[in-house]
Image: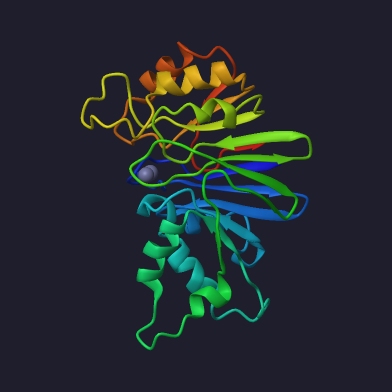
């Protein structure tokens, strides 16, 4: 599998940056994981829009799905693949929120004809092209899928947005690459509810899970990146990276 970061900013984009979005390519199949602000622009630096085979949306927050809207319009007038359908996998709540943006006044639903919806809630397992997907529980302010992807004997785990949850360790067990959110620093006190992870907690989960490589993402742009790295590294001794647009790894 080839993973490319389209955007890794938490909640709002940094100057020139983008919110959550990743491309995963394997055996000629392309999965777009999360479609935060700015990611469609970045995606087209790597593949044409007509080469996206499926989309995964972790949860119903705008910083993870709003670029599906321009993606729909980028496909709509195309002639190259007139019958192209790109299924979207994610929790039901994403569909409910997204379709409010896209439903036409006359009630006709062109959106579903091009982007058919596939409900994918925690506990579900499915094959998408050559990828085997398992959806794990997590702790967020709306239903979020923590995604484990297996293909070609390798494992990628992507948390989406989550606070500490016992299932994260299972989702990332033995992962070759653990793409884990690290929105907060140790000192973060602004939101009492544990809906995001601190960098140290990301490191602790990666260690307990036995992940081979930890990549931190969904980092708030105003955070001190040096501190993010230091706090994660204090709990995880393996290879550690901070995701940034354009980063790519073979898994
Ligand atoms: Zn988010
Ligand atoms: Zn969120």
At horizontal 61% and vertical 66% (from top left) the residue drawn is 86
At horizontal 49% and vertical 32% (from top left) the residue drawn is 180
- Whether residue 24 is visible, yes or no, is yes
Whether 63 is drawn above or below 167: the answer is: below
Of residues 85 and 36, the one nearer the viewer is 85
Whether 144 is drawn above or below 207: the answer is: below
- Provide residue 181's location: percent of width, then percent of height: 44, 33
- Provide residue 234's location: percent of width, then percent of height: 45, 10
Quadrant, the C terminus? top right
Of residues 146 and 182, the one nearer the viewer is 146
- Whether residue 251 is visible, yes or no, is no
Quadrant, the N terminus? top right
- Provide residue 67's location: percent of width, then percent of height: 44, 60
Outermost residue, front side: 123
At horizontal 38% and vertical 25% (from top left) the residue drawn is 225
Outermost residue, bottom side: 106
């Amino acid at each position: 599998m080839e993973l490319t970061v389209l955007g890794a900013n938490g909640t709002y984009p940094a100057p020139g940056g983008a919110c959550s979005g990743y491309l995963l390519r394997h055996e000629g199949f392309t999965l777009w994981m999360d479609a935060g602000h700015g990611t469609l622009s970045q995606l087209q630096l790597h593949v044409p829009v007509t080469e996206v085979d499926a989309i995964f949306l972790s949860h119903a927050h705008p910083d993870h799905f709003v670029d599906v809207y321009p993606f729909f319009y980028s496909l709509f007038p195309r002639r190259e693949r007139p019958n192209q359908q790109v299924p979207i996998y994610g929790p039901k709540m994403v569909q409910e929120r997204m379709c409010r943006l896209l439903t036409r006044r006359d009630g006709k639903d062109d959106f579903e004809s091009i982007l058919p919806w596939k409900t994918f809630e925690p506990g579900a397992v499915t094959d998408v092209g050559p990828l085997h997907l398992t959806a794990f529980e997590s702790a967020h302010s709306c239903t979020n899928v923590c995604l484990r992807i297996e293909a070609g004997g390798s494992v990628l785990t992507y948390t989406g947005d989550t606070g500490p949850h016992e299932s994260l360790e299972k989702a990332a067990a033995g992962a070759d690459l653990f793409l884990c959110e690290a929105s907060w620093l140790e000192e973060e006190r602004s939101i009492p509810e544990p809906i995001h992870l601190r960098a140290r907690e990301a490191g602790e989960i990666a260690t307990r899970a036995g992940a081979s490589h930890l990549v931190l993402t969904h980092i708030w742009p105003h955070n001190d990146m040096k501190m993010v790295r230091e706090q994660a590294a204090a709990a995880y001794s393996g290879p550690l990276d901070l995701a940034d647009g354009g980063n790519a790894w073979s898994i």
